[in-house]
Image: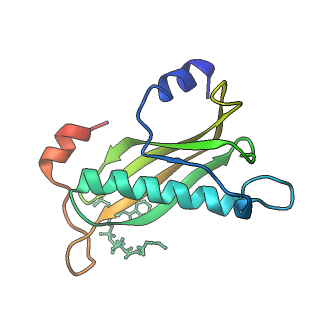
Amino acid sequence: MSEEELNELIKLQPVLRVAPQPRDLNNNGHIFGGWVLSQMDIAGGIMAARVAQGSTATVAIEAMSFLAPILTRDIVSVYAQVERIGNTSVSLRIDVVAERNRGEDHVPVTSGLLTFVALDGNHRPRQIPAESKAKYKA
Ligand SMILES: CC(C)(COP(=O)(O)OP(=O)(O)OC[C@H]1O[C@@H](n2cnc3c(N)ncnc32)[C@H](O)[C@@H]1OP(=O)(O)O)[C@@H](O)C(=O)NCCC(=O)NCCS
């Protein structure tokens, strides 16, 4: 991610802001990849539910990149942007940025493309509402 792209990204409202805890560290003193992935899935689920106007399930996690470690005392922001809306699915670009040195530095740490499927009451795929397609269309 270029510095220009990072500066544009951090102007957006993150879906989540989280302070990782010491229990989330691995033996290198970095935050576990699984913890990061979990935050991305939670943030993506929140955004996907807005787009789908109801329940969704994660159907695919693609193109994950772990760019830099998250360190203790970082504040983690998770951004979700609509990349594609299909008939029943929505693909989101999820970017994770670590804020450190009391907000002096912003470091892109992870990004990925996650796809969610809108679900009906029987846990089967449901059409994404047309008004959401107009509102969120990438
Ligand atoms: C989500 C689920 C209901 C979809 O059922 P399905 O029979 O695969 O549905 P379909 O084949 O009709 O696909 C539905 C949509 O998902 C998309 N899709 C399915 N598999 C995909 C994949 N691997 N990557 C990207 N998109 C995918 C399809 O393209 C389709 O999108 P569209 O309607 O916008 O064109 C089913 O796969 C499921 O329940 N999976 C488990 C979900 C879950 O528990 N997630 C949590 C993981 S721990």
The residue lying at 66 percent from left, 24 percent from top is: 104
> Which residue, as the protein is rendered here, is positioned at the far front?
102
For the residue pair 82 and 12, the one nearer the viewer reads as 12
Kindly identify the residue that appears in the image at 62 percent across and 42 percent down. 75
x and y, in percent, of residue 11 in the image: 45, 25
Q: Quadrant of ligand 1?
A: bottom left
Q: Is residue 90 visible?
A: no
Instruction: Classify residue 19 as left or right of residue 23.
Output: left
- Which residue occupies 24% across, 56% down? 52
The location of residue 125, given as percent across then percent down, is 26, 70
Task: Say above or below: 42 vs 136.
Answer: below
- Horizontal arrangement in the rendering, residue 134 relative to residue 14 (left or right): left
Q: Residue furthest right?
A: 28
In percent of the image, x 42 and y 54: which residue is there? 44
Q: Residue furthest top?
A: 4
Q: Say whether residue 14 is left or right of residue 7.
A: left
Q: Give the answer, above or below, for where 38 lies relative to 73.
A: below
Picture layout, residue 6 above or below residue 46: above
Above or below for 3 versus 59? above
Of residues 62 and 1, which is closer to you in this image?
1
